[in-house]
Image (cartoon, grey):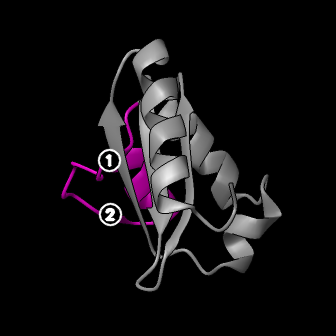
Amino acid sequence: MPWSNPNNFLFDKDNIIQYAPRASGVYRIHNADREIYIASSPNMQESLLGHLRGDVACILQATPVWFSCQLADNKSALKKAQELVAELKPLCN
């Protein structure tokens, strides 16, 4: 199951506030070389801001550049995140 949202935004505070919804879904953080982190959240904006502040040290150490989000209900988002992690093997999951 590939990532289906082609929109990527710079992984910084301004872009997270502008483009990450305060809603449930699955999100990914990556750079040009690899997937860094994929997860589901009931509030993607809040989770991404937490990662930007370093709540998962591995993410910032991996030099993230972009993030992307997909809206989904909590149950669907959790399933999709688990499938994507198994397929894409992000560095920090």
Give the magenta range.
Answer: 1-21
Labels 2 and 1 touching (C-beta < 8 A): yes
Quadrant (top left, top right, bottom left, bottom right) of the C terminus: bottom right
Q: Residue at x 44, y 23 (%)?
A: 24
Q: Residue at x 65, y 68 (%)?
A: 91
Q: Earlier in the sequence, mark 2 or mark 1?
A: 2
Q: Identify which amino acid the numbered label 2 is placed on.
A: Phe
Q: Which residue is mark 2?
A: 9
84 in relation to 37, above or below: above
**Closer to the camera in the image, 58 or 10:** 58
Q: Residue at x 22, y 50 (%)?
A: 5
Left or right, 6 with respect to 25, comes to left
- Image coordinates of residue 78 in percent, x first then y, are 52, 26
Q: Which residue is mark 1?
A: 19
Q: Residues within 10 Å of mark 1 (few under 14, many from 20)?
A: some
Q: Residue at x 54, y 37 (%)?
A: 82
**Closer to the camera in the image, 6 or 65:** 6
Residue 7 magenta = yes
- Image coordinates of residue 14 in percent, x first then y, are 43, 59
Mark 2 lies on a secondary structure that is strand
- Image coordinates of residue 31 in percent, x first then y, are 46, 78
